[in-house]
Structures are given as C-alpha cells and as structure tokens.
Image (cartoon, rainbow, N blue to C red):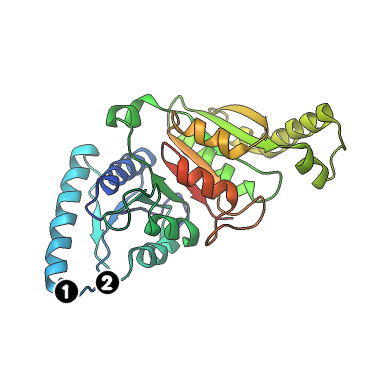
Amino acid sequence: MTSTELPVIAGVDGSSPGREALDWAAREALGRGLALVVVHALQRTRRTGQEAQRREAEELLTESVRRVNEIAPGLHPTTLAPLDFPAAALTALSRAASMVVVGSRGLGGFRSLMLGSNSLATASMARCPVVVVHGGQPAEETAEGFQDVVAGVAADESSESVLEFAFEAAASRPGARLRIVHGWTMFSSMLSGGPVFDRDAAADSAERTLAELTAGRREEYPAVEVVKEPVNGSASHTLVAASATAALTVIGRRRGGESLGLGLSPVAQTTLTHARGPVAVVPG
C-alpha cells in the first residue's frame, strides 16, 4: 500500500482544538479520497477506572463519527481506542498512515501554552507527516477561503519530502497555489560554498536553488501554480506570517542548525509554535 492509499489518522481528546483537527482531517481525507481513522488514547489514572474511561471514549468516538458524517458525508470513518499515552499511540499508528492530524493543544497542561506536549511529541516522533491544527480560523474560511499551500525549504535533500507532500496537498485543492519559501542570508550562502560578501550573487544563488528544487516536480504537477519566494532573512518569520492565510504550511522536521527539544529544528519549532493555521511537519 502506497502513502497515497494509507488512511488519515485524527487524534481526538474532547478539546476544542481536537474537534477542529477532526474537522480538518475529515475534509482532507475526503478531498484526497483516503480513509479516516479517529483515535482516542486511553490512559490509566487514579481518578477514573478503565471501564469508566472506555465508556467516555466510546461516547467521544461516537460523537466524533457523527461530526465527521455531517462534515464529510460518505467518508465512513473507523475508530480506535488504544491503551497508551496519546503521543505513543499516534506515533505507532503513523507507521501505516498517510498523515496524522492533531490539535495544537489538548485538555491537559497549561492553557497559556500555544503548543501542547502531545502535539509536540507526535510531530517530533511520527513516521509520517503530522498536521497540527491551530484554532481561531472560522470554519467557512478554513474550508473554502484559504487555498494556498506554503512550503518552507532548505538547500539540501531534506526538502525532497517537504516538496512532495506540499505538491500533493496543493494538487488536491483545486485552484490552490503553492508558495515555496527559501530563507537565505549572506552567512548561510558562504557556508554552502556561495559568494562571499556579494549580496546580488547570494540572491541569485537562492533563486537557482529554488529552480533546481522545483524543476522535476513542476512537470509532475503541471496544474499546480508555483510561486517561488527567496527570502533574505528569517524563513520562520515569513512562514508564520504566511500561515495566517494559508490552507496549510509545510515544513521539514529537522534542518538548519541544532535540534531544539525532541526532533525539531529551530525553524520547525518556531513555525509550529507560532503558526496561525494548520502546519504539516514532514520527517526526512
């Protein structure tokens, strides 16, 4: 079974961000012609027994299926309630999924945090792309208004999987543009063997990098309009700003410097934490 045939996994926990993630996953699965699996992880706690948790899980999953049937009629999702920590359960399921979709925060933890621990851990460890859905966008805008897919790329092989996922996402959205962002500085240009203290030559090098990265894929996806955006400065700032009006922002999990926390690069962590729309974190 290829990645384009594997199901979309939606993690739910009863929170508002979890419901928004479920809505996004249902629309994405329907648009791509994929199956949807709704997952709620059970955990043993001192406050509630296993049977009580199972009843709560059944109620949540039943309500989730009803919600999916309203949003994406004909999708017929299946459900799972594994006994495990949420991030561990979703990471295990990611081995046979096209993507995992989660909300930015769950019911636990500090409400002041912009990114929950389960979302962060899943995005850091999953074997397939993980989409973290940040709330705040009206449903009608999320479904119809914002169509552009934004991808952040680096000048190395880590961008291959990012571009593949981004092109597929754009192709599944009729009329969507793919904006490909590549951040560069004079320092990064020199590190990669580029010109020294020559801004124009460094800018030309960034343009060539984008042309080389997109050449083959533009032939594979001729219907996708591509906009190349070399950015002199912080790519993460550009990606965060672009996420506010994007259907999806796509980034690689590890690239550009030392990893911060778990398996995320500084660009990935900044974008994922501060984005204002759905962000896909793609493993290399």
Q: Which mark is first along the chain, 2 or 1?
A: 1
Label 1 crowd bin: few (<14), some (14–19), many (20+), radius 10 Å: some
Q: Is residue 245 visible?
A: yes
Is 16 in front, or is 47?
47
> Residue at position x 53%, y 27% from top?
223
Task: Answer with left or right where residue 181 lies relative to residue 90.
Answer: right
The amino acid on which the numbered mark 1 sits, given as a three-letter code, is Gln
Q: Position of residue 282 (x, y in %)?
A: 52, 51
> Residue at position x 38%, y 63% from top?
87
Q: Disc 1 marks which residue? A: 50
The quarter holding residue 137 reads top left
Label 2 crowd bin: few (<14), some (14–19), many (20+), radius 10 Å: some
> Residue at position x 61%, y 34% from top?
181
Q: Quadrant of the C terminus?
A: bottom right
Q: Quadrant of the N terminus?
A: bottom left
> Residue at position x 41%, y 57% from top?
97
Q: Is residue 165 visible?
A: no
CA separation, marks 1 and 2? 9 Å
At numbered mark 1, what does the secondary structure look like: helix, strand or loop?
Answer: helix
At numbered mark 2, what does the secondary structure look like: helix, strand or loop?
Answer: loop
Q: Disc 2 marks which residue? A: 83
Asked whether the residues under the numbered discs 1 and 2 touch, taking CB atoms below 8 Å apart as contact, a structural biologist would say: yes
The quarter holding residue 278 reads top left
Q: Position of residue 241 (x, y in %)?
A: 51, 31
Q: Is residue 187 above or below residue 11?
A: above
Task: Answer with left or right where residue 231 lies relative to residue 117.
Answer: right
The amino acid on which the numbered mark 2 sits, given as a three-letter code, is Leu
Q: Position of residue 22 (x, y in %)?
A: 28, 46
